[in-house]
Image: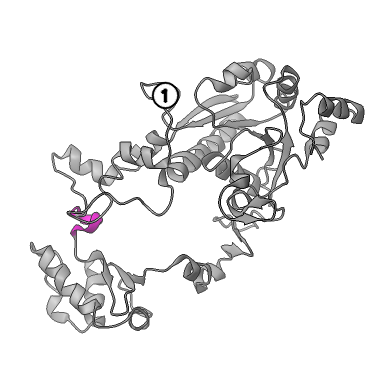
Amino acid sequence: MNLLEGIRILDLTRLYPGPFCTMMLADMGGDVIKVESPGEGDYFRKMGPMDGEDSHYFRLLNRNKKSITLNLKDPKGVELFLRLAADADVVVEGFRPGVVDSLGIGYDQVRRINEKIIYCSITGYGQDGPLRDRAGHDLNYIALSGILDITGQAGGPPVIPGVQIGDVGGGTQMALSAILAALFARERGKGGTYIDVAMLDGLVSWLPISMAEVFAGNDVKRGEAELNGGLACYSVYKTADGGYMALGALEKKFWLSFCAAVGRNDLRDVQYQQDQAGLKKELAGIFGQKNRRQWEEIFAGVDACCEPVLSLPEVKDHPQVKAREMVTGKSLSFPVRFKDGGPVQSEPAPAIGEHTEEVLLTAGLTDEDILKLKQEGVLGSRGC
């Protein structure tokens, strides 16, 4: 079921947040045209472990898309982009504020020729504010959001998360939600719109639990908040073989199940006692008596919210992940299921400029036009 069939998205993004967003739009049936600069293209093509001519990074973020090469620093390249934008539904870009305007392909320029366009900009800090022009990466965004400060063990330094929270949570998911909402609103006659997504904004919006403490006048210390290592019943414990188990028995019923499973019913009434450090030490001693596999077997049939901390290779082969077909070959699948069918992962990430001729021919250009544009450097040499 192609939910976004007939919706054309021009993708000017590269690296992580934007490409992930447009890939999900493509997974849902959108016609995503990835516009890349001739020669280099998306930087992710050559970053990280390689898989043939392109990297695994790139291949995991760009399936189901078409790629064209277009020199947007050439007036003819801008003219071609606007020609495509005239019939597009969505434009997604991830340059610094003002760049697309200086190129002549910003929202105002596109809207003059297409009033129904939905134009989404993804940046670190947004289109206004004192940091609008400042460079940044995921680590900087989580630092300024406060998330980095509350991540780690009590008394220890901030710990960098193992995934790019700012890129995906603050950028990809916020942009995706906004674009889909805008498409829905447009179908109801509300027209096109401009969407300003700032990764820092997205991260700050992720803080209702922690900010609730701040608004109440409480201090939120690293590793000491209730859901941040402060509670013994919601923590990670090392096993005898060096593995780890994640215990999340917050509700009383889960805590009672946990106590029964480990043979410590004497702990039933001390779940939220004042001495959480002492209780954590007690639980650490319990988990340290068996290896991870033994604990997995013990909790396999127990509703205690206690699971092993898996390595990434283990995740790939986990029965639940396999049952949901979240890993297929060397790709990760679209994470949502629809009753009447759903996104079908069908096409691999495109080679740079693979669809240039196809897209431009459908836009009304002739073979002769395309050849001339290649010779003039407006298109890449690999335009087919």
Predominant secondary structure in magenta?
Answer: helix
| Residue 147 x %, y % | 30, 44
In this view, 234 is above or below 171:
below
Task: Please indicate, yes or no, whether residue 205 appears anywhere in the rendered image.
Answer: no
**Residue at coordinates 52% horizontally, 41% vertically from top-left?**
17
> Horizontal and vertical percent for residue 235?
25, 64
Q: Which residues are magenta?
A: 224-230
- Amino acid type shown at disc 1: Arg
Q: Secondary structure at mark 1?
A: loop
Q: Position of residue 140 (x, y in %)?
A: 37, 38
Q: Residues within 10 Å of mark 1 (few under 14, many from 20)?
A: some
Classify 287 as above or below 181.
below
Horizontal relation, residue 333 to residue 72: left or right: left
Q: Which residue matches tag 1? A: 132
Q: Quadrant of the C terminus?
A: top right
Q: Is residue 251 left or right of residue 383?
A: left
Q: Which residue is drawn at the image coordinates 62% and 39% (left, top)?
A: 42
- Between 323 and 1, the residue placed more toward the observer is 323
Q: Residue 71 placed where, x, y %?
A: 71, 27
Q: Residue furthest left?
A: 274
Q: Is residue 175 visible?
A: yes
The answer to whether residue 327 is magenta is no
- Asked if residue 75 is positioned above or below residue 324 in the image, the reply reads above
